[in-house]
Image (tube, rainbow, N blue to C red):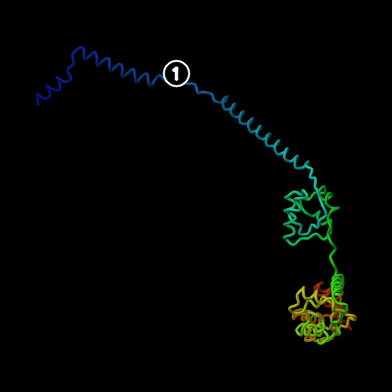
Amino acid sequence: MQSFKNQIKTFFNFNKRQERGAFVLIVLIILAFGIDLLLPKIIKEEPFDFSSTIAEIEAWEASAVKETSQKTFKSKTKISNKTENEVIILTPFEFNPNKFPKDRWLEMGMPESVVNTILKYESAGGSFKKVDDLQKIYGLTDEIFAQLKDFIQIPPKETLKETIHTLAVSLTEESETIILLDINRADSVDLLQVRGIGPFYAGQIVKYRQRLGGYNSLEQIKELYKMDSSRFFTLLPYLTFKDTILNRIDINTADFKTVLKHPYIDYETTKKILNHRNRLGRYAGLYQLKKDSILSDSLFTKLKPYLKVD
């Protein structure tokens, strides 16, 4: 134990030179700590002012945005002025605008956007019945229409009488005699003389005449079962009606079955007619069927020749 103490004493026993060195080292350490603590208080660091730099950057950005906006506005204005001031010169020729091919429109110099609008209008079921109808097309300006209007050729719609006349003339050229049958008087045997009418259609014409109470128009033949437009126009030159002989239904006295029997009147319409008669007591005139909304305008027009009020 005594030997260990001696060893420790010997370890911490410094000579003069070592003592001076240790002293100097301690002083330096104290100075280093002191400087580290006191230097920030002695020398105060001034913060760097970035405000001027930030202001310059913001001014530059604002200038760049303004310049870009001006260029965009000028570009748009230039395009707009070009569109507004553009003069379209057409090279029109006589044409019917209905179902007119796209390439022919473009051949005249029509803008493609306007042509596409016309084609869309027609595909949706639209048509041009008169020259001025073309003005309702979006994009077709007054200047364009002024160049086209004198060249637009829309043929008038052919009336039924004109169609019959045309067919009759055509058939007269093939045959010197044409048999005309009154559809309100001819029986099924008579009707068999007409080219295109066989036993089936002869029977249909007579039966439908009985159900109607007589034909009021040649166009009613189109209402026959399985009668198409082609066959109808083939038969027209041979048919006529000289006298309108109609059996009319008295809506003040007819019973439910009699009214329902007519081919233009269904079950619900029959109920409306008779129920309204019960409320009124009697009809003063046929106009009440339309006025009181018992019949639609179109149905009233079709039925009026077959009804009466006594």
For the N terminus, the quadrant is top left
Residue under pointer 1: 43
Q: Amino acid at mark 1?
A: Ile
| Rendered image quadrant of residue 207 | bottom right
* Residue 272 in which image quadrant: bottom right
Measured from the top left, where is residue 136 in percent x and y?
80, 55
Point out the residue furthest to the left here.
Answer: 2
Q: As rendered, which of 37 and 307 lies closer to the eye? A: 307
Q: Tell me: 244 left or right of 196.
A: right
Q: Residue at x 85, y 69 (%)?
A: 159
Is residue 281 placed above or below 53 in the rendered structure?
below
299 versus 5 height, above or below:
below
Q: Position of residue 250 (x, y in %)?
A: 85, 84
Name the quarter where the C terminus is drawn: bottom right
Q: Considering the numbered disc 1 on the image, is that residue within a helix, a strand or a loop?
A: loop
The x, y position of residue 42, in whole percent, is 43, 18
In the rendered image, residue 138, in percent from the top left (x then y), is placed at 76, 52
- Residue occupying image coordinates x 84% and y 78%: 238
Residue at image location 77% in from the left, 86% down from the top? 257
Q: How many marks?
A: 1
Q: Is residue 123 left or right of residue 30?
A: right
